Image (cartoon, rainbow, N blue to C red):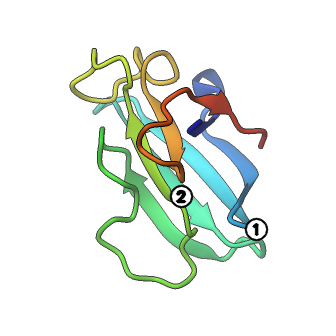
Amino acid sequence: MRDYIPINKDNLPEQFEIDLANETFVMEVNYNQTQDFFTLDLYDMNRDPIVLGEKLVLNVPLWGDLTDQRLPAPSLVVLDESGQTKRITFDNFMITTFIYIDDVAPEEDNPIEVSV
């Protein structure tokens, strides 16, 4: 099953620690209310920035265009497995669209929540 990262969109910006592939990172999720989009900041455990302001785009892996050895091993991607969404909005984020940890075989498609 594919895990997703639980975000409380009503408390943004939200910063939390998360374990990915035996490494701990700090993530911060932000929301741009004027343009209706989300961004994600990624830090190492010392809170040194790795990537700042990565815009969440539906079906596009985060940091897909970056090469940095400090990035987490599993791919993170925002998906709407119901197929209802064309783009991420405040109204559908954490309702039908979730940030998934894409570390499972394609035939496994039942998401479960990851503790952060």
Q: Which residue lies under the disc numbered 1?
A: 22
- Residue for point 72% across, 71% down: 47
Secondary structure at badge 2 equals strand
**Residues at discs 1 and 2 in contact (Cβ within 8 Å):** no
- Residue for point 41% across, 43% down: 106
Alpha-carbon span between mark 1 and mark 2: 19 Å
Residue at the front extreme, as displayed? 107
Residue 116 falls in which quadrant of the image? top right
Residue type highlighted by circle 1: Asn
Residue type highlighted by circle 2: Asp
Name the one closer to the observer, 33 or 22: 22
Secondary structure at badge 1 equals loop
User: Residue 113, image x and y in percent?
Assistant: 68, 31
The N terminus appears in which quarter of the rendering? Answer: top right
- Report the number of numbered marks: 2
User: Residue 28, image x and y in percent?
Assistant: 61, 50
On the picture, is 45 further left or further right than 79? right
Name the one closer to the observer, 81 or 104: 104
**Residue 38 in sight here:** no
Residue 24 falls in which quadrant of the image? bottom right
Q: Which residue lies under the disc numbered 2?
A: 41
User: Residue 7, image x and y in percent?
Assistant: 63, 32
On the picture, is 38 further left or further right than 47? left
